[in-house]
Amino acid sequence: MTSLEGRPLSAGDSGYQRIRSDIIFGVLTPSGRLKLDAMKEDYGVSISTLREILNRLTSEGFVVAEGQRGFEVAPISIQNLRELAGLRILLEQHAMAESFRAGDVEWEGRVVSAHHKLAATERTVLKEGDDPELRKRYDGEFHQALISNCGSRELMQTHAIVFDKYFRYALRYRGAETINQHKALLECALKRDIKSAKTVLTDHINGCVAHALASWNED
């Protein structure tokens, strides 16, 4: 596995990314015990490295440390989903406003490019079936592009963690509604229309919450 810059990852960083991804996409089930001996074989890292990874994921909220009992995958709940949705709206609306105000041609290029890749992925999903990992990658890149000129690396990093935790609940695709909302966000960005963008974003996230809860009830 390599980093986004193309550099080979250390065993610890590779293990961290794989375990984090497996939590987000439900391979490691919510509230499930994380057994170090089995994980050592599955992820090819030492027990000491595993503990470092799980402590890091605990600090991010993906894992819960149970004292002497070890580690568990963080649980999911309706309350947590609503909290994450509210936090994402708060962070992303503020970051979009700052980014739109400071937006330049370079920023526009990033937004347009990110939306182009996301739209192509969404068309493929509609034709060929969903690929949650690919969809999440380009969905996240688009929303990060929208806020990429906000001037705060801390804000962007916090948003990225909240987005990943939120995506644990957004694994089922909503289809055309999502496509239209992403296109509307692009148009708002190019017009620097932050008022409309905030409304679209709120509808987008609340729609995802409603869809996730409906899917939850079906299960």
Image (cartoon, rainbow, N blue to C red):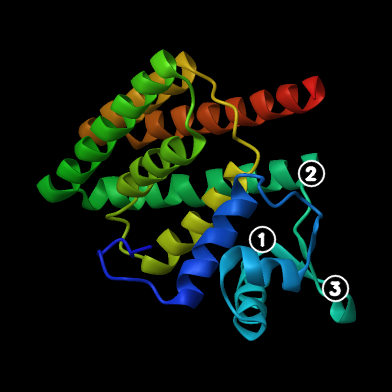
Identified by mark 3, the residue type is: Glu
- Quick one: 48 or 153, which is closer to the camera? 48
The residue that appears at 47% across and 72% down in the rendered structure is 13
- Is disc 3 placed on a helix, strand or loop? loop
- Quick one: 189 or 35, which is closer to the camera? 35
- Is disc 1 placed on a helix, strand or loop? loop
Q: Is residue 39 above or below residue 184?
A: below
Judging by the rendered image, the residue that carries numbered circle 1 is 62
Callout 3–callout 1 Cβ contact below 8 Å: no
Please give left or right for residue 60 compared with residue 72 in the image: left
- Quick one: 129 or 100, which is closer to the camera? 129
Disc nearest the viewer among 2 and 3: 3
Identified by mark 1, the residue type is: Phe
Q: Is residue 51 above or below residue 95?
A: below
Q: Residues within 10 Å of mark 1 (few under 14, many from 20)?
A: many
Judging by the rendered image, the residue that carries numbered circle 2 is 79
**For residue 215, which quarter of the picture?**
top right
Mark carried by residue 1: none
Callout 1–callout 2 Cβ contact below 8 Å: no
User: In the displayed image of the protein, which residue is found farthest to the bottom?
Assistant: 48
Q: CA distance from mark 3 to mark 1?
A: 13 Å
Report the quarter where the C terminus lies.
top right
Judging by the rendered image, the residue that carries numbered circle 3 is 66
Q: Is residue 171 above or below residue 215?
A: below
